[in-house]
Image (spheres, rainbow, N blue to C red):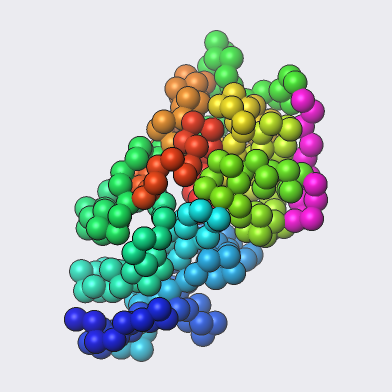
Amino acid sequence: MVANSGRWGAVMGGSVVRVATDADMPGVREVAAHYELLDDWADMPDFLDAEREFGALVVGEAGGRVVGFGGILRRARVSHLGDLFVLPEHQSSGIGREILALLLPPGTPGVTFASDDGRALALYVRQGMRPVCPLLYLTFTPGSARPDAPETPRASAPDGRPVRRAARARGDRPDVREAAMLDAGLAGGDRAGSLSWYAGLPGVTVHTTGTGYAFARVTEGGDLEMGPAGGETPEDCAKALSAAVAAHPGVDEVQVAVPGAHPILPRLVRAGWRIDDMDTLMATDPSAIRLDRYLPHPDLG
C-alpha cells in the first residue's frame, strides 16, 4: 500500500519510488544490464542519460538498493515511455505501477513499445494506452538481397533531391535542424534537443533529402542501427532510409524498427529484410504519430 504519494515520489512499505539522482545511476545500469539493454551503448552517453536530460528517470528502491526504473522522453504532445523494468524478484510488488504513475500521471498522453509480458500490457492499458499495431524489428545483411527486389537499399543516393550527410553530425548543423523539423510533425511533437544530443554521439550520422530524414548509428559491434527516420510521404521515408543504408556499405548488419501499419514493411520483407522480433506499439492517442511515414528509434522512440 502507498503510504505517501506525490509528484516527486511514493513510499510503499519498505520500498521507495522517486526521481533518480546521480548516485542512483550505477544501480540503474545494473538493472539495465540484467535485461541487456546497454549492449549497444558501450563507452558513451546512453539513452538513460537522454531520459534524465530530456524527460525523466524514476527509480524503485527496496532495502536501500535500486531494483527497478522507468524513463520517459518528452515531446511537445506526447511522452515516450522508453523503459519500465523491475528485477524479477520484485515484480508484482507494485513498484512498476508506482514508477509508471510518477512518470505519466493520469491524463498524460503517452506512447510505448510493449513486450509480450501480459502484466506490463495490462499496466499500460490501465494507464490509458491502447494497442495500436505491432512494432517489428527487422535486420538486413548487405549483399543478401534478392536480385529481383527493386526496393533493396542502393549503393548510391536515390534519384531526386540530393542527400546531405554529416559523418559525425553536431546538433547545430542545418541537417540536424531540418531533420528535427520533419520529425516534429511525425513523432508527436518537437524534440530538437534530444535529436541534437543523439546527433552528437560518436558514430551517428544524419541524412536529409529535403522531404525525408534518417538518423543512423554504427554500433560498437559494427552494425548499423537506424532511426528515427521519416518523410512527408511513405515514399520519402523509404528514400531517406535507403540513402542512409547506402552510405554505410561496410556494416555487418542493418537494423530498423518498423510499425506494422507502415507501407514500407512488405517492400523490405520482399527485399530480403528479416523480421527478428516484435513489440506492440501502444498509445493514448494513435493519431499523434504518423505510423505510415515514421520509423522510430528502438530506444529513443
In the image, is residue 2 above or below residue 158? Answer: below
Nearer-the-camera pick, 102 or 242:
102
Residue 167 covered by magenta stretch? yes
Q: Is residue 183 left or right of residue 63?
A: right
Majority secondary structure of magenta residues: loop
Q: 235 or 273, which lies in front? A: 235
Q: Is residue 117 left or right of residue 27?
A: left
Query: What x and y, as percent, mark residue 237?
Result: 60, 31
The image quadrant of residue 230 is top right
**Residue at 24% over, 87% down:** 3
Is 115 located above or below residue 83 in the figure? above
Q: Residue at x 53, y 45 (%)?
A: 187
Check the image and name the residue furthest to the front: 107
* Whether residue 286 is visible: yes
Residue 94 lies in quadrant: bottom left
Q: Which residues are magenta?
A: 161-174
Q: Who is closer to the viewer here, 56 or 273?
A: 56
Which quadrant would the N terminus be assigned to in this image? Answer: bottom left
Is residue 267 within the magenta segment?
no
Residue 99 located left or right of residue 2 = right
